[in-house]
Amino acid sequence: MNKAKFITFEGVDGAGKSTHLNWFAETLRQRGLDVLVTREPGGTPLGERLRDILLNQPMHAETEALLMFAARLEHIEQVIKPALKRGTWVVSDRFSDASFAYQGGGRGVPLDKLEQLEHWVHADLQPDLTLLFDIPVEVARQRLSNNVTLDRFEQEKGAFFEKVRQAYLDRCKKNPQRFALINAAQSPEKVKADLERIVSSI
Ligand code: TYD
């Protein structure tokens, strides 16, 4: 039997990854796999409380980075590692690449500090596959404008999201074997077709 895999979904707010994530997980289940869907920040009772703070309470950029990684450590130890160990696949809506993109690219937290946190929190774990939903920032902003309420990140300006997008693309370039880059500006049907190809190659 194949070893259980850890798969993450990433992209700027408004890229549409959450919609596709559920469909992707369902497709894996139809192949007879046991699949756990989770998210960051969050995924544990403590992580969800930290999520509420992170999405609503203004704070120093480095505090934000530390809290993201604190929530992550809890998520890894309580949820991700136990699931993988018992043979359950884990599909997470965001993971550390989001910290490099948002806190690193968006907020300007130095890369070496984030690398230290990454090493501290999960030196022994990386996603087997990361799907990066890439989309021009204006298109993503347009989609977000339909939302009634926007959280602290979603309220950021276009320039912030340009930096987030670029930082994601840099991570993708640095780790080409782990990333699959998806053109999220395409129609949902075309994105689905791309995902189908990815599922069949896993
Ligand atoms: P998101 O997946 O966008 O939740 P929703 O689709 O419900 O709005 O995640 C919430 C926000 O958290 C998102 O704007 C990105 C941000 N975030 C970071 O800034 N750093 C991180 O490490 C993570 C995991 C998320």
Image (tube, grey):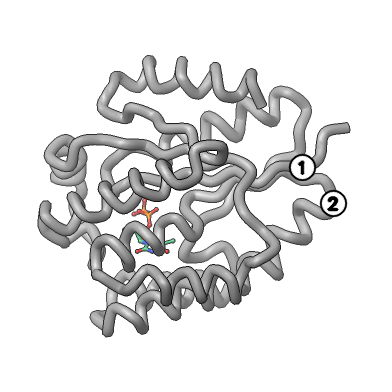
Give x and y (percent) for residue 102.
Answer: 31, 61
**Residue 182 has which mark?**
none
Mark closer to the chain start, 1 or 2: 1
**Residue 4 has which mark?**
1
Give x and y (percent) for residue 5.
Answer: 70, 42
Q: CA distance from mark 1 to mark 2?
A: 8 Å
Give x and y (percent) for residue 87.
Answer: 82, 45
Disc 2 C-beta below 8 A from ligand 1: no
* Secondary element type, mark 1: loop
In the displayed structure, does residue 150 sit left or right of residue 157?
right
Query: Residue 164, located in which quarter of the rendered image?
Result: bottom left
> Relative to 6, does residue 69 appear above or below in the rendering?
below
Q: Is label 1 or label 2 in front? A: 1
Disc 1 C-beta below 8 A from ligand 1: no
> Relative to 161, does residue 32 appear above or below in the rendering?
above
Tell me what residue is drawn at x 34 percent, y 44 percent.
169
Amino acid at the residue labelled 1: Ala
Tell me what residue is drawn at x 42 percent, y 76 percent.
113
Amino acid at the residue labelled 2: Arg
Query: Residue 110, located in which quarter of the rendered image?
Result: bottom left
Query: Can residue 43 be spotted in the picture?
Result: yes
Quarter for ligand 1?
bottom left
In the displayed structure, does residue 77 sit left or right of residue 103?
right
Tell me what residue is drawn at x 36 percent, y 74 percent.
54
Q: Quadrant of the C terminus?
A: top right
> Relative to 9, does residue 183 appear above or below in the rendering?
above
Give x and y (percent) for residue 182.
Answer: 39, 29
* Callouts 1 and 2 close, C-beta under 8 Å: yes
Q: Which residue is mark 2?
A: 86
* Secondary element type, mark 2: loop
